[in-house]
C-alpha cells in the first residue's frame, strides 16, 4: 500500500514539476515545490474564515504529499525540487540522437553484409559452374584444358576440389590430384599451412595430405602437438596419409596428453590402414602407466583382435584401476575362452570398476561352476557390480534358473536386481 501511495504521489509531483514550474505571484514567505505552495500563512488576521479553511486544507494536502515522497520536512523537499524542475533537455536530445544514429548504422551494416554475402555466393556459383565440368571431364579421363585460375580464386578452388575429392577413389582421385599439381597449388598449400588463418590452415592440411607433400610433415607435426581439438586431429589425419610412422607418433602423443572423442579418433586411425591396430598395440606397450585407456578403447572399437596379446601383457603390469577395467571390458568383447582365468583373478579386486568388468567377462567366457561366484557378486555393495553379475547369470544359467534363484534369494537387494534383469530379458 505504501509503495502504491508513493507511486501515485510521485506521478502527481512530476505533473506539477513539468506542468507549472513556478508561480510568480506566490508570496515571498511561501515555499514552492514545482509550483505547489507548501507553506501556509494568512495574509492578515482579518481574512475571511472560508478562505482560511481552504488555504489550510490545501497546505495540509501539500504537506502530506511531501511526507509521502520524501519523509522529510517541507523545507528540505523544497531545496531538492528545483534540481528536478530544471531538466537538462539538451542531454536528453543528445541521447536520443545517439540512439537513432546507432540504429541507422546497424541497419546499414546489416545491409552491406547481406550484399557482400550475396556477391560471394554469386561469385562462388559462377566459379563452380566454370570449373565443375572441367573436373568431371578429368575424372572421366578426358584431357580437358584447364581454365585460368586467378590468385584470388585459389582458396575457392581448393574448397571445391577437396569436396569432389571426398567422393572419388582410385584413378579418379589421382586425376584430381594431377589437376591441382598442374595449377601449381602445392606451393600455395604449403604457404597457406604456415601463415593462413585457422580455418584456412585446416583446408591447407587437407590439401597437403591429398597431394602427399612430405615437405609439410614438420609443420603438421608441430600443429598436432598444439593439442587444439580440430587442428590437431586434422594434422594427425594428414600425417597418417603422408607418413604413417610420424602420424602414429603424433597420435600417441595426443592420446597420452588429452582425452578425445573415441568416435572421432576411430575415423582418424582408420586412415592408417591395416597397420593401425599393430601401431596401437605398440603404443599400449610404451605409454606410461595409466595412459593406455584411450588406446584400449580404440582397439575395441576397431575390433582389433591382433592387439589382444599386448593387452594381456599390459594387464599384468598395470596398477591403474580404470586402465585394468578398460582392458577387461575389451577382452570381454574381443577375447576368447582362455581369458576366463583372467576374469577369475579380478573378481575380488578392491575397485568396484574392476569387479564389474570381471563379472561382465564371466558372462562371455564363464562355465557352469562360475554361477556360484556370480551369486556372491549379487551381494556386492555397488549397484553396477550386482547388475553385471545378474546379467552374466542370465547368460550362463538361463531365465528359468534365474527366476527360481529369485524366489529363493533372501537378500532384498539381490532379489531386486534379479527381478530387474528378468524384466529386461522378457
Image: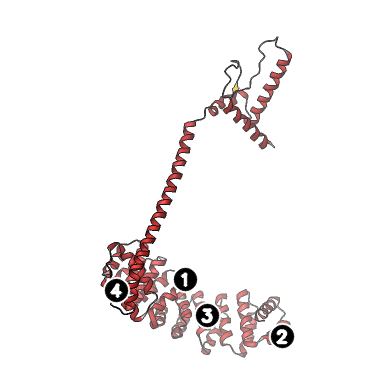
Decide: few, some or many residues near mark 3? Use Cα within 10 Å; few <14, some 14-19, many ≥20. many
Q: Which comes sooner in the sequence, label 1 or label 2?
A: 1
Nearer the observer: mark 1 or 4; the answer is 4
Residue 425 got which mark? none
Q: Residue at x 42, y 72 (%)?
A: 255
Query: Given this view, does label 1 or label 2 mark the residue nearer the observer?
Result: 1
**N-terminal-most mark, 3 or 2:** 3
Tag of residue 329: 3
Q: Quadrant of residue 78?
A: top right
Q: CA distance from mark 1 to mark 2?
A: 43 Å
Determine the secondary structure under disc 3.
helix
N-term-proximal mark, 3 vs 4:
4
The answer to whether mark 3 and mark 2 are in CB contact below 8 A is no
* Image side of residue 399 versus residue 132, left or right: right
Of the numbered discs 1 and 4, the one sitting upstream in the chain is 4
Tell which circle, 4 or 2, labels the residue nearer the N-terminal end.
4
- For label 4, count other residues whose C-alpha is less than 10 Å away and answer few (under 14), some (14-19) or many (20+): some
What residue is disc 4 on? 179
Amino acid at each position: 500500500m505504501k509503495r502504491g501511495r508513493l507511486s501515485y504521489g510521485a506521478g502527481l509531483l512530476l505533473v506539477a514539476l513539468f506542468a507549472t514550474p513556478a508561480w510568480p505571484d506566490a508570496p515571498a514567505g511561501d515555499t514552492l515545490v514545482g509550483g505547489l505552495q507548501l507553506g501556509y500563512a494568512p495574509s492578515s488576521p482579518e481574512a475571511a474564515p472560508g478562505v482560511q479553511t481552504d488555504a489550510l486544507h490545501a497546505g495540509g494536502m501539500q504537506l502530506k504529499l511531501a511526507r509521502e515522497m520524501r519523509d522529510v520536512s517541507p523545507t528540505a523537499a523544497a531545496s531538492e525540487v528545483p534540481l528536478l524542475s530544471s531538466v537538462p533537455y539538451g542531454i536528453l536530445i543528445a541521447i536520443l540522437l545517439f540512439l537513432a544514429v546507432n540504429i541507422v548504422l546497424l541497419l546499414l551494416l546489416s545491409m552491406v553484409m547481406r550484399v557482400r554475402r550475396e556477391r560471394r555466393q554469386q561469385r562462388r556459383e559462377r566459379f563452380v559452374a566454370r570449373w565443375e565440368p572441367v573436373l568431371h571431364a578429368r575424372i572421366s579421363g578426358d584431357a580437358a584444358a584447364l581454365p585460368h585460375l586467378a590468385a584470388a580464386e585459389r582458396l575457392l578452388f581448393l574448397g571445391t576440389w577437396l569436396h569432389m575429392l571426398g567422393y572419388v577413389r582410385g584413378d579418379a582421385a589421382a586425376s584430381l590430384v594431377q589437376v591441382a599439381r598442374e595449377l601449381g597449388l602445392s606451393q600455395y598449400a604449403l604457404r597457406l599451412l604456415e601463415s593462413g588463418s585457422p580455418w584456412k590452415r585446416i583446408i591447407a592440411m587437407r590439401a597437403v595430405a591429398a597431394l602427399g607433400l612430405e615437405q609439410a610433415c614438420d609443420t603438421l607435426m608441430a600443429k598436432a602437438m598444439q593439442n587444439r581439438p580440430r587442428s590437431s586431429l586434422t594434422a594427425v589425419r594428414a600425417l597418417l596419409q603422408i607418413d604413417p610412422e610420424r602420424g602414429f607418433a603424433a597420435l600417441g602423443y595426443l592420446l597420452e596428453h588429452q582425452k578425445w572423442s573415441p568416435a572421432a579418433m576411430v575415423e582418424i586411425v582408420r586412415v592408417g590402414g591395416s597397420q593401425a591396430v599393430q601401431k596401437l598395440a605398440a603404443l599400449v606397450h610404451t605409454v606410461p602407466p595409466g595412459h593406455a585407456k584411450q588406446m584400449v578403447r580404440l582397439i575395441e572399437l576397431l575390433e582389433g583382435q591382433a592387439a589382444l596379446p599386448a593387452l594381456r601383457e599390459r594387464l599384468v603390469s598395470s596398477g591403474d584401476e580404470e586402465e585394468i577395467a578398460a582392458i577387461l571390458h575389451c577382452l570381454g568383447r574381443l577375447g576368447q575362452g582362455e581369458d576366463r582365468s583372467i576374469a577369475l583373478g579380478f573378481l575380488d579386486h578392491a575397485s568396484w570398476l574392476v569387479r564389474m568388468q570381471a563379472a561382465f567377462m564371466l558372462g562371455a567366457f564363464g562355465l557352469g561352476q562360475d554361477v556360484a561366484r556370480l551369486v556372491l557378486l549379487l551381494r556386492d555393495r555397488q549397484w553396477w557390480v550386482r547388475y553385471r553379475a545378474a546379467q552374466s547369470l542370465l547368460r550362463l544359467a538361463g531365465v528359468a534358473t534365474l527366476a527360481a534363484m529369485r524366489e529363493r534369494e533372501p537378500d532384498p537387494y539381490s532379489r531386486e536386481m534379479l527381478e530387474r534383469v528378468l524384466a529386461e530379458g522378457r
